[in-house]
Image: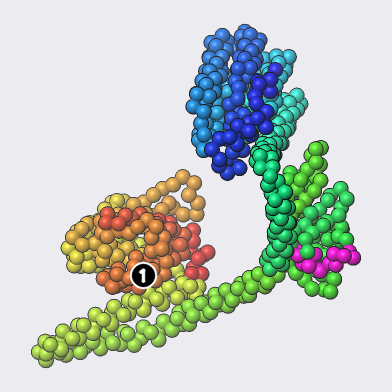
């Protein structure tokens, strides 16, 4: 029972090629594509009749099994798809589109194929489950016949064939797979193999048609050329001589291209090869022989000879890659070392594709061999250089961490002496000196804060940052912190508000680091917001299944300041990163606050995230375990 019969009369390939060549000329591929679509639309009458007949047979057979309403609904759906395709063919013939407009028509026909295939698939879904085995055989026969018949017509445009055959047959395989049992699984396997066979056959049919159209068009061009030559009988000899000269030039060009290809392979270190699996013989290009240092004239290559050259430690990888390609046609791709006859070792990247014979047995593998010895050496040197750079970075961080006392001591002395000198100046009535000393003190404190940030980050990178866990009241910590930050917020005309749950209770964590995290967020909000509003929230979050700690404490800092672009949020948590140079000039800072805050959150088993929009402000969320000592302190303390 053939749903897409070849009897549906269509012009042969040469006729369509002649018609396409008479149309306005385009590229050869475009004309072939147009010829395929014209063949697709060449007829619909018998195809529609057979589809209707098959559908009627199924409806009559299953009318008492699945209910009359469902059968009528399915028939209506099928009839609508067939009528739509008939109408589409009529529109196509009326429009007589040019080659350049064929893609839209191909898509429309593919839609119709999908519709009809889905209608047959629905039959597999609603009719097979209710039927006895004998009736199931009838249904499978109708569906299989429809799909098989489509090979001869729909493969004129292979995507249209796929759109029909997949929805038509896939439900059958799924039904039998779900039915289970020896019969069910057997039928599911057979259905799947039949689908694979149809896809393979359809592809072959489509490729054969394409080749036929190509040859027909090329032959038609040759016929046109000979016709013109005949019309110019007086110039035949001259034309023949010119053609011979052109052929000689083509031959010369071909030889030149072959030489260029050989040079290109030599320069790129890329050789090509072909392995005849049945004879076990491997043939390759000159460059392939050069890569493996084999004398092409005196030595033949077999697969066993090739495997002898593969480094012993790499043979398993090569064997496994070849086995995978043998099994399902997977692209053979492997990097291995080749040991040459003189003991030289080369690193080779091989890629190959398997071709199967008519019995689906591996027949030939063709591929390339790329000599990447130099690239491999450079990569190893780069990895060594990267390792050295990382060692240097760790040494730098270790040095800065060790120098923390040496940096802080003189700065603290400057700050302390400036305060003492200011007291003396005030006592002596030297107001002008007092102002200068205030500036020295402020500059020293600012420098100390910057040094502290850099040293904290260095200690983190050096693995010397430790956690000091203590119990503290969350609301009290937030209140003290807000009192500290309030002057910063007020300096830019900002309103600072607190929203804390009254029963937050106590938290076990490194209070200093929690305070520093929130201070960094609040000071950033105060710095980047003017005449706005800053809100700090704290709440306790209990989650089912939480392990090793008593829920979470979540802090949120919200502002309506300058904000930042979404693609810059992650970069803001990187060390020394700021939005741009103008931000640095206007607002100052090292760009370390958020980076340090993230490290602290991760040390305590928590996380920090942000949401922001330019001109609309930012929301930073800190999530920390309520009991850090039980969940994280043993694993992270002192690790950075």
- Which residue in the rendered view is the most extreme toward the right? 298
Residue 604 x/y as whole percent:
45, 62
Residue 371 x/y as whole percent:
71, 66
Residue 461 x/y as whole percent:
48, 73
Q: Quadrant of the N terminus?
A: top right
Crowding at dot 1, Cα within 10 Å, few <14 / some 14-19 / many 20+, comes out as many
- Which residue in the rendered view is the most extreme toward the front? 234
Q: Nearer the viewer, residue 211 or 82?
A: 211
The secondary structure making up most of the magenta span is loop
Q: Residue at x 83, y 60 (%)?
A: 307
Quarter of the rendering containing residue 373: bottom right
Q: Is residue 19 magenta?
A: no
Left or right: 563, with 327 as reference point: left
Left or right: 227, with 488 as reference point: right
Q: Residue at x 49, y 58 (%)?
A: 631
Identify the residue position indicated by label 1 in the image: 591
Residues in magenta, as a range: 287-299
Q: Nearer the viewer, residue 337 or 259?
A: 259
- Which residue in the rendered view is the most extreme toward the bottom? 428
Residue 289 x/y as whole percent:
80, 64
Taking 218 as reference, is 96 above or below it?
above
Taking 428 as reference, is 113 above or below it?
above
Dot 1: element: loop
Q: Residue at x 60, y 20 (%)?
A: 44
Taking 429 as reference, is 157 above or below it?
above
Q: Nearer the viewer, residue 404 or 629?
A: 404
Q: Residue at x 20, y 58 (%)?
A: 532
Q: Nearer the viewer, residue 620 or 74?
A: 74
> Can residue 479 be seen?
no
Q: Is residue 291 magenta?
A: yes
């Amino acid at each position: 029972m053939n749903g897409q019969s070849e009897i549906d009369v269509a012009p042969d390939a040469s006729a369509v090629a002649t018609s396409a060549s008479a149309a306005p000329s385009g590229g050869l591929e475009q004309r072939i594509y147009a010829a395929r679509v014209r063949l697709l639309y060449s007829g619909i009458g018998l195809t529609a009749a057979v589809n209707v007949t098959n559908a009627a047979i199924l409806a009559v057979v299953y009318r008492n099994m699945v209910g009359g309403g469902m059968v009528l609904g399915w028939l209506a759906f099928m009839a609508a798809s067939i009528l739509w395709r008939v109408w589409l063919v009529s529109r196509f013939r009326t429009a007589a589109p040019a080659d350049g407009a064929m893609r839209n028509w191909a898509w429309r026909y593919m839609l119709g194929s999908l519709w009809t295939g889905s209608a047959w698939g629905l039959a597999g879904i609603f009719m097979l489950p209710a039927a006895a085995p004998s009736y199931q055989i009838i249904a499978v026969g109708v569906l299989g016949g429809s799909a098989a018949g489509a090979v001869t017509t729909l493969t004129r445009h292979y995507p249209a064939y796929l759109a029909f055959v997949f929805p038509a047959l896939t439900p059958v395989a799924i039904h039998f797979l779900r039915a289970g049992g020896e019969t069910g699984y057997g039928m599911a396997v057979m259905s799947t193999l039949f689908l694979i066979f149809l896809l393979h056959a359809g592809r072959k049919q489509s490729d054969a048609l394409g080749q036929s159209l190509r040859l027909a068009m090329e032959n038609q061009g040759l016929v046109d050329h000979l016709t013109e030559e005949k019309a110019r009988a007086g110039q035949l000899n001259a034309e023949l001589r010119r053609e011979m000269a052109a052929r000689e030039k083509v031959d010369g060009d071909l030889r030149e291209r072959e030489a260029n290809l050989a040079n290109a392979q030599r320069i790129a270190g890329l050789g090509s090869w072909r392995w005849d699996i049945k004879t076990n013989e491997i043939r390759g290009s000159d460059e392939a022989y050069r890569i493996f240092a084999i004398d092409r004239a005196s030595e033949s290559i077999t697969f066993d000879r090739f495997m002898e050259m593969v480094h012993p430690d790499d043979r398993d990888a090569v064997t496994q890659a070849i086995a995978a390609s043998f099994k399902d046609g997977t692209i053979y791709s492997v990097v291995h070392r080749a040991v040459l006859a003189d003991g030289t070792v080369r690193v080779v990247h091989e890629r190959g594709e398997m071709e199967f014979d008519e019995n689906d047995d591996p027949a030939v593998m063709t591929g390339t061999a790329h000599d990447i010895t130099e690239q491999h050496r450079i990569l190893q040197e780069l990895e060594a250089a990267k390792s050295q750079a990382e060692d240097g970075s760790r040494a730098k961080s270790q040095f800065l961490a060790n120098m923390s006392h040496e940096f802080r001591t003189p700065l603290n002395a400057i700050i302390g002496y400036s305060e003492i000198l200011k007291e003396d100046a005030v006592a002596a009535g030297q107001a002008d000196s007092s102002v200068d000393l205030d500036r020295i003190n402020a500059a020293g404190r600012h420098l100390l804060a910057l040094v502290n940030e850099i040293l904290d980050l260095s200690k983190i990178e050096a693995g010397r940052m430790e956690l000091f866990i203590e119990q503290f009241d969350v609301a009290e910590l937030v209140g003290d912190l807000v009192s500290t930050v309030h002057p910063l917020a007020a300096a830019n005309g900002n309103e600072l508000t607190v929203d804390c749950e009254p029963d937050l209770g106590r938290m076990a964590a490194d209070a200093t680091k929690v305070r520093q995290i929130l201070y960094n967020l609040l000071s950033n909000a105060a710095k980047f917001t003017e005449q706005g509003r800053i809100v700090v929230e704290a709440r306790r979050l209990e989650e089912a299944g939480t392990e090793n700690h008593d829920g979470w404490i979540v802090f949120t800092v919200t502002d309506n300041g300058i904000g930042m672009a979404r693609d810059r949020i992650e970069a803001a948590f990187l060390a020394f990163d700021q939005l741009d140079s103008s931000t640095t000039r206007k607002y100052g800072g090292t760009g370390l606050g958020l980076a340090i805050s993230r490290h602290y959150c991760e040390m305590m088993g928590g996380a920090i995230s942000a949401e922001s929009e330019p001109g609309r402000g930012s929301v930073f969320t800190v999530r920390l375990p309520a009991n850090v000592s039980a969940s994280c302190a043993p694993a992270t303390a002192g690790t950075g």
